[in-house]
Image (tube, rainbow, N blue to C red):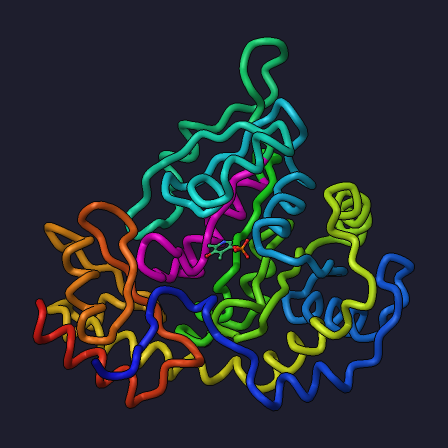
Amino acid sequence: MSELVDLRSDTLTRPTEAMRAAMARAEVGDDVYGEDPTVLELEERVAGLFGHEAALFTPTGSMANVLAVGSLVAPGQEVLCESSAHIARAELGAHAAIGGITMRTWTGHRGRPDLAAIRSLFAPDMGPFFVRTAAVAVENTHNFAGGAVTPLEQLQELREWATGVGTGVHLDGARIWNAHVATDTPLAEYGAIADVLAVCLSKGLGAPIGSLMVGSRDAVDEARVRRKRMGGGMRQVGILAAAGLHALDHHLERLAEDHAHARLLAEACGLDPETVDSNIVVVERHDAPAYVAAAAEHGVRIATVGPTAVRMVTHLDVSREDAERAAQVLTKIS
Ligand SMILES: *Cc1c(COP(=O)(O)O)cnc(C)c1O
């Protein structure tokens, strides 16, 4: 069997030698005291990229989402989101278990916001009768919709409506970097449609650990308290922030290569490569586990995301050669 190409997730990347060197060099301090200069630099830089006042480093994207949604939605209130959103499906009920938050969902084409559906779900404050909608959450790119990008205009329309009715907007931007590179949309334009965001450094950007919640100074100050309460107050964490700064310097523009590799894989699976917006390919197969096993036999690791759905994700540790090799295998077993 040939060497493995691992396409199960873009979280599988290992820090490069250069990233490890940057981590080793990092100036550090106690971040619970607000004294880690590298963390402060990363938080300020990421807040600036999105045009917001402040940001907060967290160990995971799930924690950044819980802090961000929780800054808009109080216990006993609800957030509206797409039915296959990461916050609904993949955070193990954290928003309910930790935040006391309920959810109602719409099902969107390619995971996108459906403003008509959102308007009909929306419940303003109606006293002791209905759960109040305190926020709408969107995800861009959308993980389970196959890395789909939501057009900026649709997000702007949602923002305008939400401001009009006085409800918050959260953007789960774990892969907002991919949307930015795929469409050339400035990060600040995405920042402008949301009150709060969560962004990950540990997906396509290739850092080993780290995400940030981004928002107003007040929201971030309050989230800093809740982060500590959840056990997420870390100390000399500049070592990890340095990996994030390195990733922003060296691994952002190269995401375009991952997108090209994903289109290659899509074509090999018989999909129109134009339907692949970024670094994720989701393919329907009548027996997903059997297809995954067949790929593994040929040295290509992919993952099921449902009984008939298979997901493959390109990333920093998948070279052009790897992608071509995987494409050959996928053509053979289709
Ligand atoms: C990966 C991911 C997250 C965060 O996941 P963690 O494993 O908690 O870091 C959040 N949202 C989306 C859409 C993701 O793909």
Q: Which residues are magenta?
A: 135-163
Left or right of 138: which side holds 333? left
Instruction: Pick the residue in front: 144 or 286.
Output: 286
In the rendered view, tell whether residue 324 sits above or below residue 33. below
Residue at 52%, 40% in the rendered image: 136
Q: Residue at x 40, y 74 (%)?
A: 182
> Quadrant where the C terminus lies?
bottom left
In percent of width and height, residue 2 lies at 23, 83
From the viewer's perspective, is 282 left or right of 73? Answer: left
Locate residue 317, reporting x and y percent: 42, 81
Query: Horizontal placement of 57 versus 217: left or right?
Result: left
Identify which residue, 242 or 142, lies in the foreground: 242
Nearer to us in this view, 49 or 202? 202
User: Does 167 sit above or below residue 277?
Assistant: above
Of residues 307 and 146, which is closer to you in this image?
307
- In percent of width and height, residue 217 lies at 80, 54
Taking 17 as reference, is 39 above or below it?
above
